[in-house]
Amino acid sequence: MLQNNTHSKNNNHFITRLDLQQNLKELLEPLKDRAVIDGYYLGDAGAHYPPKTAVMEGFCRTLWGVGPLIAGGGDFPNLDVVLSILKNGTNPDSDGYWGVSGNRDQRLVEKASIALTLMIARETFWDPLSPTEKNNMYQWLSVIEKRELPPTNWHFFRIMVCTCFRELGLPVDEKAEQESFDLMDSLYKGDGWYEDGMRGNFDLYNPMGFHFTVSYGLNLQVPKIRRERKTTLNAQNFSPTILQHGLPPAEKQSPTDAVFVTVLEPLRFFPPALLQICPCFPGVR
């Protein structure tokens, strides 16, 4: 039973990679009964976009965990369901098709987790696809290169998709990619901080939406992303100590550490487990 499992949520101390992997699987386990043809149905509560998009979002957000889990050597018990939803969602002939994303569309955001999953766990999520399924996936993702995005962290999602295409040997709209790099450069305000939009917003998307995404790009073997430009190097203002050693004690935190306290506080206690589950962070083998 669950309470007798030494890695269960009741006594998981987050010391090893297995601890973190097991916790993720326990966290996502209830979703197996919520799977529908195009995602996970989580109820009718309050998103500002259509219910079908909410079902898709409920699914795509789990890929931020499932992709690194598989890439790090873990297993996921409902992987066949995940693969089926991905194929249905990007197949225009399927009843589960997610549709064509419009300008400033929430579906543009969710493309990033799919792109990440395809490129870091391609042996599971990309290589087995048929030529038609690969084309469906590419066509659905590539819409983000053609759409208007708000001047926010959304541009990193486009960069993530372009990075994925380059990793998989697919065509990249370099003009759209450059537009996003330039926009992100314009939002950088120094000392590791990005303004999220043009209204002076500095919020928790700095670690969650900016540096997290940049850290993946920096550590993938993609020359375009590893070039010496401001956007890709800004994350290094935080990453050497934060991502490899965790946050310093509160009394020693600099102002540039402060934004990480709420989101990444657990790094103090289990950085090895967090870093080892994903092969894309610095120093992880």
Image (cartoon, rainbow, N blue to C red):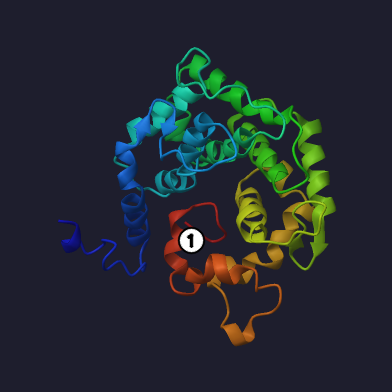
Q: Where's residue 100, x and y in %?
A: 62, 22
Q: Residue at x 41, y 36 (%)?
A: 40
Going by the numbered disc 1, the residue's amino acid type is Leu
In terms of secondary structure, where does tag 1 sit? helix
Question: 268 left or right of 211?
Answer: left
Q: Where's residue 223, x and y in %?
A: 71, 43
With respect to residue 142, does 54 lie above or below? Answer: below
In depth, the one of 151 and 69 nearer the eye is: 151
Q: Residue at x 31, y 39 (%)?
A: 32
Q: Residue at x 59, y 35 (%)?
A: 49
Image quarter for residue 149? top right
Q: Where's residue 158, x and y in %?
A: 69, 38
With respect to residue 241, does 275 lie above or below? Answer: above
Q: Which residue is mark 1?
A: 275
In depth, the one of 244 and 199 nearer the eye is: 199
Question: 284 left or right of 227?
Answer: left
Q: Where's residue 73, x and y in %?
A: 38, 48
Q: Residue at x 41, y 40 (%)?
A: 42
Work out which quarter of the rendered image holds the N terminus and state it: bottom left
User: Which residue is at the far front?
Assistant: 45
The total number of labels drawn is 1
User: Which residue is at the far top?
Assistant: 93
Instruction: Give neighbour class at mark 1: few <14, some 14-19, many 20+ (Cα, 10 Å).
Output: many
